[in-house]
Structure formats: structure tokens, C-alpha cells
């Protein structure tokens, strides 16, 4: 993907729906690209220093102690809970296919969210949906 | 009949290395030390790679300290010397500082080129120069490289082809302005308004060089500048190029903007640059005399994409496994600066140093051993350790080993605790491989850093398929052989005995 394709892809994701084209370009520029092969672990349970990841292409599995709890795909994101709570992640994220992500270092997530309230609101909505699904599961 | 005197005629080789920069020369040296027969071919006419042309303003950003806390003859010295290639024998070494005139601890470009050439000569690394790799096909269990001199068939190609092909993002008009690689000498920008696209090292390098000459300099790219002393990475803009940024911060008349470049157009012998602010919104049209695209480089992959090589970083770099093999074309390996395609763990967002000599020289050492053992039946002897020595050995590595200091959170010293084979030094291993690979109980020692400017040893303990991370304390003078380090590491080692 070149920069234009990445910007187009980001623009189609709910998380970035409120951003203008220059703001999307800034995201594409500020985030690093990462590439993971099938079965590679992207985030490791208990390891420090993980980044915030947005899936551009591919599918990943969320596993706690080896047991799959959820699947993630295009437009999904992960790593933010570990960063915002300043705790090591409580799950492995494992690439089920070749996985192409954008990654923001943990040190930059907080300032980026503060500078982009639209993204922060969308992220909060996504977290609440995840919470509702988890609550439904338990009940 | 000069052809007869050239080494490595076309034919069959176990390994073919493409390139003649420091990456190619280092991997060739390492393969030779392990007895792996290989050819080295290069389109260039002499060793040096990118250092024949870059950095543009003739001085590197990687230091080699003439005077360091340890003697030059030791391997630990390389922690303080980011530019010398690795040699086992002292007579093969061409220590970069020996070629420097003392005016800076950053070598001049020509000094670096001279030290690489001297290394190749002393270490006996030979290259078939002016032999251009033109095409690649997969054939049976290997590959065929078509070159200007004929066909090379090999089981393993290692592409150490650098990252010096100018790259521009898709901005209208940007394709018509000079790239960093083709920028003029600083005095030729005298009294000009200069717009530089890009806020990485090449952009700041040019801006710094133009400060005494240009009337005004504007650096722009969509995201805020990433600076080494803030972001703790040598991949960021380096401190010694920060004068233009200080000028901007203090209102000196030069600017560092966060803006998306909309388009660039010629206008009456000058340029009109349309930008849209990102950190601070706003549309602007800037009139300038010169525009330079300091937008970086890409790996000249030739036809490798058509062969299935996956890329990332906006299609600029091949995506690689922890052992620098293409993730999509098994058996195809990369060395030198291209080895940055194996990203590693990137903890706290800090990338490896694989893009530079200080990092990729160690990658070459690890890659050569990996190829020798995986494909060519070579077994590198593992030193056996007694239990009493393990803690001291690993803390000594954490305190002094240049591999760990120069490739933080990327390369690790691994000691295995196999019930049958005993306690063995497994050598230097990519950390990303260790934490995901099965194997006997083992410990990996690395050096890591966090955003609070702490540098500390981190230990990864593998038991079964589970790997746990344990951070040891930092120390003011980075001496990790203190009582508290011994105590903590001893408790981890004891679990594995």
C-alpha cells in the first residue's frame, strides 16, 4: 500500500470517520506500518511497551492463556487498554493471516487522543460496545 | 581479457550475495568465517555502497569515539564505535576512528568509505564488481539471478542492496522537484526561500546546512517532528541537526510546520506550495524559490515484488522474518540496511538500529550462522557453562556486550538449560524469534529502554511454550553487575537449574 491507499483505507474505518483528509494524512504519517506473518504474535501477554495497533488488512485472534476470546479484522484496533491503564496486556494478539497494521508508540497515544477528540469519542463508543458484548456473555 | 581476472564467474553457488556496501561486505565476511562458499556480485565499481554518495552534506550521524571507556582492541569497544565492521582477527579490523581526522566524532563520508574499503581489503572480501543483477526467477530449491555477466544459480540469495533509491509520496507536483539525492550544494541556495518536504534526518540535515545560506527555510510534513532525544531512537531526527528547529521555536524566521502538502506548482520561475495544517488547521499557499523532496528512500527491489516479496513502509522495504527471510518468499534473505524489514518487538515504539551499520553488522553475524546451520549442515559449537557462572556471564553481557547495547530489545544473548545437553551459551539470537519459538528452558538477556530515559537489562525466561519478561533495575552508570542484579537474576536462573 502506498500512502494514498493507506489514507483511503483509514478514511473507511469508523474510528477515523470524523477526520478530514489532511488529518488522515497526518495519521498515516505519524503511525508506523507493521507487517506480521501468519501465526506471529503481535502483542504478547505480560510484555511491557506495546503500541496501539490499527488493522489495515488481515485477521487476528485475541487469546488469553492460549484460549481464543475474540477475533479482530480490518478497522479494529488493540493495545489501547494496556497503554491507557499502564499495565502489560492481558492477552496475546496472534496473526491468523498475514496482518498489516498501523502502529502508534504508546508514548504518543495519549497526546494524540487529546488532540483528536473525534477519534477519542469513537474509541470510547467501540470500548462500550466491547463491554456490552462482554456483559452479555457473562449474563 | 579483464573478464578472466574477475572473481565469481556466473554459475552455481550455494549462496549469492548481491551488493558491495557495508552490509554485503559484512555478510560475506561472516559467511567466509563459517566456511560457506558464496559469490558476491555488485553493480558498483568499488566497495562502499551508499557511502559513495551520502550523506549529502558529507558527515555521518553515527559516531565512532576515538577515546572510549574500553580499549579499541576489545569487542566491547564497538559499543562506542557505530561504524566499524566486525572482524574476528585484529589484523582484519579497520577501526573507523583510525580513518578520522579528529575534527568530529562523526566520520566524514569519505572517511567512512575509506574504512569500508580498507576492511574489504584486509579481510580479503572479494566482489565481482560491475556485474548488475537484472532479474530473478525461482528455480527448484533455489533461485536464478540473471546479471549483466550471465546467470547465477544458488540455493540462497542474500540481497544487501541498500536503501538508496529516492522515494517520494504521491503528492501532485512533488515528482518534478529535486530529491534530497539531487539537491545542490548549500551555497547554491544563497538568499533563496527554500521549502523542504520532510522532517526526518535528511530534511533536517539539508536545513542545517542551508542555515548560513538560505533567506528562509520551511520544513513541512503532516506529523510533528520525531526527535532522537525526545523519542529515544536513532531512527528519529538527530540532535545535531536540531538548529533549524531551535530557530523555529525561538522565532528566528525559519519554520518547521505540521502540514499536509496538497500540491506543488511552478510559477514564474519559482514554486507555489499549497499546504493544509494538521496539528494547527489552516490552508496556506507559500511562494518559494526552491523545493526539495527530503522524503526518504526505498529498497531497489527490482523484480522481487513480482516474485511475491511482500513489502511494507509504503512499499519501500520487504517484510522479513526475525531471521531476515522474506515472509512470503521462503529461502530469500536480506542483509545490510534492508534488514530493518524485520521490525522486532519495537517496545515503547523504539525501532531496531538495523538500518545502520551499528545494528546490521550484528544481524549479519547472526544471519550467517543461521544460514550455515539451517541449510549447510554446519553446527557452531555451543560453549558449555557451569551453573555457578551463568549469572556472572549474563550480567557481564548486559553491562558490556556491544551487540546488546547497539541492538536494544532486538538481539539477545541466550543461555539454554537442556536437561540432556546441559547449560549452553546459544549465542546472539533475534529476540523476536526467541519469544515465539519453542525450545528447551532458556534465558534471553537484552538491554532495553523506556520513555523515562531508563536503560536497563531485561530478562526473558522460557519454560515450555511460556515466556515471561523480567525487568532488572537500571543503574546510574549502567553497571549491571551490582548485588541487586545478581540477586534478582540468580532467583530466575535457579528456577531453570
Image (cartoon, rainbow, N blue to C red):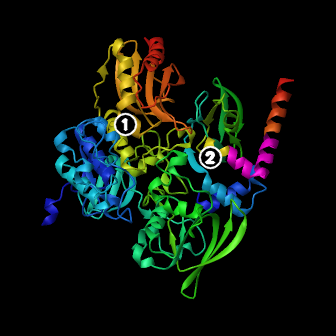
User: In the image, which disc is placed on residue B403?
Assistant: 1
Vertical placement of residue B272 versus B360, above or below: below
Residue B213 magenta-drawn? Answer: no
Q: Nearer the viewer, residue B131 or B237?
A: B237
From the top left corner, tell me how far across and down residue B156 is, in percent.
34, 45
Which secondary structure, mark 2? strand
In magenta, the rendered stretch is A110-126
Question: Label 1 to label 2, Cα distance in Å?
Answer: 27 Å
Residue A120 magenta-drawn? Answer: yes
Identify which residue is drawn at 44% across, 31% down.
B446
* In-image side of B396 versus B11 (left or right): right
Q: Which residue is mark 2?
A: A104
* In-image side of B88 versus B143 (left or right): left
Q: Please determine if labels 1 and 2 lie on a single subunit.
A: no
Identify which residue is drawn at 49% across, 61% down.
B243
The answer for which chain carries disc 2 is A
The kind of secondary structure the magenta stretch mainly shows is helix
* In-image side of A63 versus B307 (left or right): right
Amino acid at each position: 500500500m502506498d500512502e494514498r491507499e493507506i489514507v483511503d483505507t483509514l478514511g473507511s474505518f469508523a474510528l477515523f470517520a470524523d477526520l478530514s483528509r489532511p488529518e488522515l494524512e497526518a495519521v498515516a504519517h505519524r503511525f508506523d506500518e507493521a507487517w506480521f506473518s501468519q501465526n506471529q504474535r503481535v502483542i504478547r501477554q505480560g510484555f511491557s511497551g506495546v503500541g496501539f495497533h490499527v488493522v489495515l488488512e488481515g485477521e487476528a485472534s485475541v487469546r488469553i492463556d492460549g484460549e481464543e476470546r475474540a477475533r479482530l479484522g480490518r478497522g479494529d484496533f488493540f493495545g489501547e487498554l494496556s497503554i491507557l491503564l499502564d499495565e502489560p496486556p492481558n492477552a496475546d494478539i496472534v496473526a491468523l493471516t498475514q496482518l498489516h497494521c498501523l502502529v502508534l508508540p504508546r508514548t504518543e497515544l495519549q497526546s494524540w487522543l487529546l488532540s483528536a477528540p473525534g477519534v477519542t469519542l469513537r474509541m470510547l463508543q467501540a470500548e462500550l460496545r466491547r463491554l456490552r458484548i462482554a456483559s452479555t456473555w457473562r449474563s | 581479457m579483464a573478464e578472466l581476472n574477475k572473481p565469481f564467474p556466473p554459475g552455481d553457488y550455494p549462496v549469492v550475495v548481491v551488493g558491495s556496501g557495508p552490509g554485503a561486505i559484512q555478510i560475506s565476511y561472516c559467511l567466509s568465517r563459517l566456511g560457506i562458499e558464496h559469490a558476491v556480485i555488485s553493480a558498483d565499481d568499488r566497495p562502499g555502497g551508499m557511502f559513495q554518495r551520502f550523506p549529502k552534506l558529507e558527515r555521518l550521524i553515527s559516531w565512532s569515539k576515538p577515546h572510549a571507556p574500553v580499549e579499541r582492541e576489545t569487542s566491547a569497544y564497538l559499543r562506542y564505535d557505530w561504524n566499524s565492521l566486525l572482524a574476528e582477527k585484529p589484523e582484519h579490523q579497520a577501526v573507523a576512528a583510525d580513518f578520522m581526522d579528529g575534527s568530529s566524532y562523526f566520520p566524514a563520508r569519505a572517511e567512512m568509505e575509506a574504512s569500508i574499503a580498507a576492511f574489504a581489503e584486509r579481510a580479503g572480501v572479494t566482489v565481482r564488481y560491475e556485474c548488475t543483477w537484472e532479474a530473478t526467477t525461482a528455480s527448484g530449491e533455489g533461485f536464478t539471478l540473471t546479471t549483466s555477466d550471465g546467470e547465477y544459480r544458488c540455493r540462497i540469495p542474500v540481497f544487501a542492496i541498500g536503501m538508496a533509491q529516492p522515494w517520494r509520496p504521491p503528492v501532485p507536483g512533488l515528482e518534478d522537484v529535486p530529491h534530497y539525492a539531487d539537491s545542490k550544494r548549500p551555497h547554491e541556495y544563497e538568499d533563496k526561500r527554500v521549502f523542504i518536504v520532510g522532517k526526518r534526518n535528511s530534511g533536517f540535515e539539508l536545513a542545517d546546512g542551508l542555515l548560513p545560506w538560505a533567506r528562509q527555510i520551511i520544513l513541512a510534513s503532516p506529523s510533528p517532528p520525531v526527535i532522537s532525544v525526545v523519542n529515544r531512537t536513532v531512527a528519529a531526527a538527530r540532535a545535531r541537526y536540531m538548529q533549524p528547529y531551535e530557530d523555529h521555536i525561538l522565532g528566528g524566521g525559519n519554520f518547521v510546520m505540521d502540514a499536509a502538502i496538497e500540491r506543488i506548482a511552478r510559477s514564474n520561475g519559482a514554486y507555489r506550495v499549497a499546504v493544509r495544517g494538521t496539528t494547527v488547521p489552516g490552508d496556506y499557499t507559500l511562494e518559494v524559490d526552491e523545493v526539495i523532496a527530503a522524503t526518504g528512500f526505498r529498497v531497489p527491489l527490482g523484480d522481487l515484488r513480482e516474485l511475491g516479496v511482500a513489502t511494507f513502509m509504503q512499499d519501500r522495504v520487504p517484510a522479513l522474518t526475525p531471521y531476515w527471510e522474506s515472509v512470503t518468499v521462503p529461502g530469500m534473505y536480506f542483509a545490510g540496511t534492508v534488514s530493518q524489514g524485520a521490525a522486532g518487538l519495537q517496545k515503547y515504539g523504539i525501532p531496531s538500529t538495523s538500518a545502520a551499520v551499528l545494528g546490521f553488522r550484528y544481524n549479519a553475524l547472526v544471519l550467517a550462522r543461521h544460514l550455515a546451520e539451517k541449510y549447510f549442515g554446519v553446527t557452531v559449537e555451543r560453549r558449555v557453562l557451569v551453573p555457578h557462572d551463568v549469572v556472572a556471564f549474563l550480567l557481564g553481557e548486559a553491562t558490556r556486550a556491544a551487540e546488546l547495547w547497539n541492538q536494544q530489545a532486538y538481539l539477545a544473548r541466550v543461555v539454554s538449560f537442556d536437561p540432556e545437553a546441559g547449560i549452553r551459551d546459544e549465542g546472539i539470537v533475534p529476540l523476536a524469534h526467541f519469544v515465539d519459538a519453542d525450545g528447551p528452558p532458556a534465558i534471553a538477556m537484552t538491554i532495553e529502554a523506556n520513555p523515562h530515559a531508563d536503560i536497563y537489562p531485561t530478562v526473558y525466561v522460557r519454560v515450555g511454550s511460556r515466556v515471561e519478561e523480567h525487568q532488572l533495575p537500571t543503574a546510574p552508570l549502567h553497571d549491571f553487575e551490582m548485588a541487586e542484579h545478581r540477586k534478582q537474576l540468580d532467583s530466575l536462573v535457579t528456577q531453570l537449574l
